[in-house]
Structures are given as C-alpha cells and as structure tokens.
Amino acid sequence: QVQLVESGGGLVQAGGSLTLSCAASGLSFSSYTMGWFRQVPGKEREFVAGIGWSGGRKYYSHSVAGRFTISRDSAKNTITLQMDSLKPEDTAVYYCGIQYGKEVFGPSGPDNWGQGTQVTVSS
C-alpha cells in the first residue's frame, strides 16, 4: 500500500521561504510522476509542480514558475518543493500526489494523496 507523508509546512512572512518534503513508501511501479497540489477553502485543488521519475522532467504552474523548485531524491523516494519569494496568495494546504504510468500528471490527477500540510504566508 502506497503512503505519502508530507512535512515542512508552517507560517512565514511574505518574501520568505519554506521547504516541503514528501516521502513515498510501498511503491511498486517504476514509472510515475509525483508532485504538489494546493487547496484553499471553497476552491478546487490546483496543480503546483510535478516531476517525472524516469526522466526527471520538471513542470510548474504559471503562478509559481520562477519562485518554486521541485526536486527528487530517487534513493529515498522523496520529493522536495523549495518555495521562495512567497506571497500571501500562496497560503493553502499543500498536498503531495502520485500518478502511475505517467511522466506528467494526466487529467484524472493523482492516484494517491498525502494528508496535506498547511502553508500560511502573512503579509
């Protein structure tokens, strides 16, 4: 059974930085994409950043490109999201997700989710 465990959320002032991590266990697939989504109350969960496992392709939403960086540690089945120049509008619950057999997330989205971690950016 696949488990995704996030860590690293918290409170930061605008312009500051935070790093999120997601550790995956129980994986039995060799091809998948992992990444981050976020959600605020009353809105749909939205894509933030993703990374393909086979080739390491990285991709970002327009709202975070140039400020956030996704990376992976293949040996530990862990991905990290470095968030710089944070803005109040980045405030959300951030979820780690994984989709199997894909290099990038498809329309159906992740097959499994983590429990989420709160990121709050104060102005």
Image (tube, helix red, strand yellow):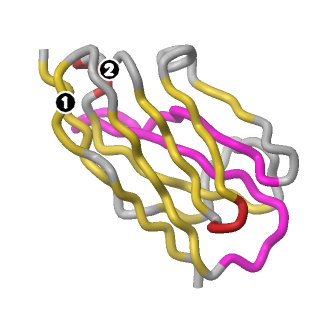
View extreme (left): residue = 123
Asked whether, in this view, residue 36 is left or right of residue 31, the answer is left
**Which residue is at 30% across, 44% downward?**
93
Question: Reading the chain from its start, which is encountered first: label 1 or label 2?
Answer: 1
CA distance separating discs 1 and 2? 8 Å
Secondary element at image label 1: strand
**Toward which corner of the image does residue 59 lie, by quadrant?**
top right
Q: Is residue 51 magenta?
A: yes
Identify the residue position indicated by label 1 in the image.
12
**Toward which corner of the image does residue 104 lie, by quadrant?**
top right
Q: Which mark is residue 91?
A: none
Crowd rating for badge 2 (residues with CA inside 10 Å; few <14, some 14–19, many 20+): many
The x and y percentages for residue 108 are 65, 49
Mark 1 and mark 2 in contact? Answer it, CB < 8 Å: yes
Asked whether, in this view, residue 88 is left or right of residue 37, the answer is left
Q: Amino acid at mark 2?
A: Leu
Q: Amino acid at mark 1?
A: Val
**Which residue is at 47% across, 41% downward?**
37
Identify the residue position indicated by label 2 in the image.
86
**Which residue is at 68% across, 76% downward?**
27
The x and y percentages for residue 78 are 58, 60
Read off the magenta span. Answer: 27-53
